Amino acid sequence: MSDKGGSKIMTTREAVSRFVKDGDSLITGNYNESMPISLIYEIIRQRKKGMTYYSQSGSFDAEFLVYGGCVEKMVSAFLYKWGGKGRGGIIEQYQRKGQLLIEDYSNFTYNARLAAGAYGYSYMPVLPAIMDSDVFKYSSFMGDKKFGTTTCPFTGKTIPVVPAANPDVCMLHVQRADQFGNAQHWGGLGSTVHACLASRTILVTCEEIVEPDVIRSSPHHTIVPGFRVSAVIEEPFGCHPFELVGYRGLDTAMFSLMNQAFKADGGLTAFFDEWIYNLPDRNAYIKHYIEVFGQEMLNRYNARSYYSAPANYGIPFQSGWDVDGISNDLGVDMEGLEKLIEEKGDVIDVN
């Protein structure tokens, strides 16, 4: 965890304007839970173009980015089909018309690409069974760079490999973060951690910004260190209508409205005008939701409390130095330590 570099708090509009550029590759990693919808809507509002979208389990986030004219290429392992059998989802329609290129991976091989990117490798070996599938045999815009093969130095067998993925921007929504970007999430993670650490820029929206001491008190929840984060935005309901553990469940009322928009002629255009383009930010979005559905409907999806047991992280000393700056082991301050080093060398017998 780091608090160096000062506060990274800004608005969603400012974060997208500063850090998301035309032609960038974007990624989310939340398995359709706690998806960063406020950031996605802002990207659509700002009419970003020519982007590549990584989405392991795409839902309306992917459909909307494509329909908004933001995305030309996708890398995915699964896409939920909106609109039913008759009309088909936007992604399906655009792909059939040649307006969208999609590179298909299995869940394992998709995650392997992110793991390689996060670890700093150029590629990652994957299970050989993938070579018997169409996922391995057919490629789109990646051509012969989608998969590769190498010889195992231990067995001599041919094994498939995938190239590292290093998206330009990762977007995520979490329960809480501090002003320096240290972000905490609990619940289903999906490929979130590797998606973040493989990316060059990370944008975090959160339900609440808390003091650094709150973050330090539960370090096991921190999934992204602040020094890797470029912007942090306090955005209550930032993942709505998706669920977020400890805050709210899936808003089926909004999902039903969106599903109808996919099925109706001109439905998505009307939805975009009403819920994205004509609403400047997430506060306006929630206000409009209350106008349409009512406060009672919004409250209906609030999570019931279910707290975990506290964990004791206590240790004898907070550090090797007491509050007066005296070494717990040597009984000297920093100046005294420097004198000891000068007199006795780098190794000091503490007995």
Image (spheres, rainbow, N blue to C red):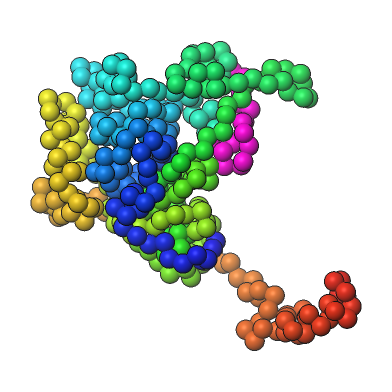
- The segment highlighted magenta reads 114-129
Residue 168, how many percent across, how many down?
46, 41
The correct choice, above or below, for 237 with respect to 92 in the image is below
Where is residue 329, by image quadrant?
Answer: bottom right
* The magenta stretch spans residue 316: no
Can residue 317 be seen here? The reply is yes
Residue 233, how many percent across, how many down?
35, 57
Foreground residue, 171 or 83? 171
* The magenta stretch spans residue 119: yes
Foreground residue, 300 or 321? 321
- Quadrant containing the N terminus in the rendered view: bottom right
- Quadrant containing the C terminus in the rendered view: bottom right
Residue 144, how many percent across, how many down?
54, 18
Determine whether, in the image, residue 237 is placed left or right of residue 275: right
Foreground residue, 86 or 279? 279
Looking at the image, which residue is at 19% across and 51% down?
280
Looking at the image, which residue is at 57% across and 42% down?
118
The correct choice, above or below, for 327 with respect to 150 in the image is below
Where is residue 58, by image quadrant?
Answer: top left
Looking at the image, which residue is at 48% across and 14% down?
138
Numbered disc total:
0
Residue 314, how many percent across, how many down?
60, 70
Residue most toward the left?
A: 291
Can residue 55 be seen here? The reply is no
Looking at the image, which residue is at 34% across and 60% down?
10
